[in-house]
Each structure stands twice: as structure tokens, then as C-alpha cells.
Amino acid sequence: MDYISRLNNFGGPAIGDVAVHAPLNEEAFAIFKKFNLNVRAVNVLLDNLRSIERAVEFAFRVEEDAVWIHSVKA
């Protein structure tokens, strides 16, 4: 997924949505994380990848209330 970190001039949220529907969930998570769309990123972890452990780890890393709220609801 190194190609995602090198891409800067593209519509991250739109490409992330396409990746979710593809389903390219790891790529969607990386795209949302790159564009600081942390709530959408944690939703991919919870809803698509079904990984509560990764969601909690991500919430600790970003330290955002909204991310924690979504993590706790799972």
C-alpha cells in the first residue's frame, strides 16, 4: 500500500468510499487515515474488517473523542 502514501493530489474521501465498496477495506482504512478522516477510518475497522482490537488501538493513537465514541458503540 505504499502507493497510497505517495498519492497526494486525489479526492481521498471519494476514493476511500470506492475502496470500501470494492471491497478494498485495508486500502480504504489507509486512505481515510491519510486524510485524517479518523471516524470514517475507525468505521472501516469496525464495520468492514470487524476488528475491535485495531479500532481501540487506533483510537488510542489519534486521541479523538468522536473516534472513541464509535469504538465504544461497537
Image (tube, rainbow, N blue to C red):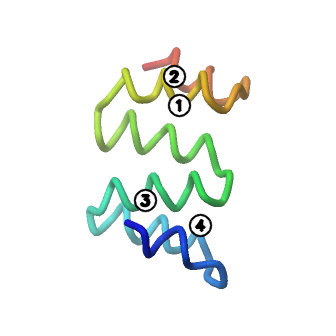
- Which comes before the other along the chain, label 2 or label 3? 3
In the image as oriented, which residue stretches furthest toward the bottom?
9
- Which percent across, then down, holds residue 28? 43, 59
Find disc 3 in the rendering and name its residue. 28
Q: Label 1 crowding class (10 Å Cα cut-off): few <14, some 14-19, many 20+?
A: many
Left or right of residue 39: residue 43? left
User: Three-letter amino acid code at disc 3?
Assistant: Ala
Q: Label 3 crowding class (10 Å Cα cut-off): few <14, some 14-19, many 20+?
A: many
- Which comes before the other along the chain, label 1 or label 3? 3
Find disc 4 in the rendering and name its residue. 13
Left or right of residue 7: residue 52? left
The nearer-to-camera label among 1 and 3 is: 1
- Which comes before the other along the chain, label 4 or label 2? 4
User: Three-letter amino acid code at disc 4?
Assistant: Pro
- Which comes before the other along the chain, label 2 or label 1? 1
Residues at discs 2 and 3 in contact (Cβ within 8 Å): no
Measure the C-alpha gap from mark 4 to mark 2.
20 Å
Q: Decide: is 44 above or below 23.
A: above
At numbered mark 1, what does the secondary structure look like: helix, strand or loop? helix
Q: Which mark is residue 58?
A: 1
At numbered mark 3, what does the secondary structure look like: helix, strand or loop? helix
Measure the C-alpha gap from mark 1 to mark 4.
19 Å
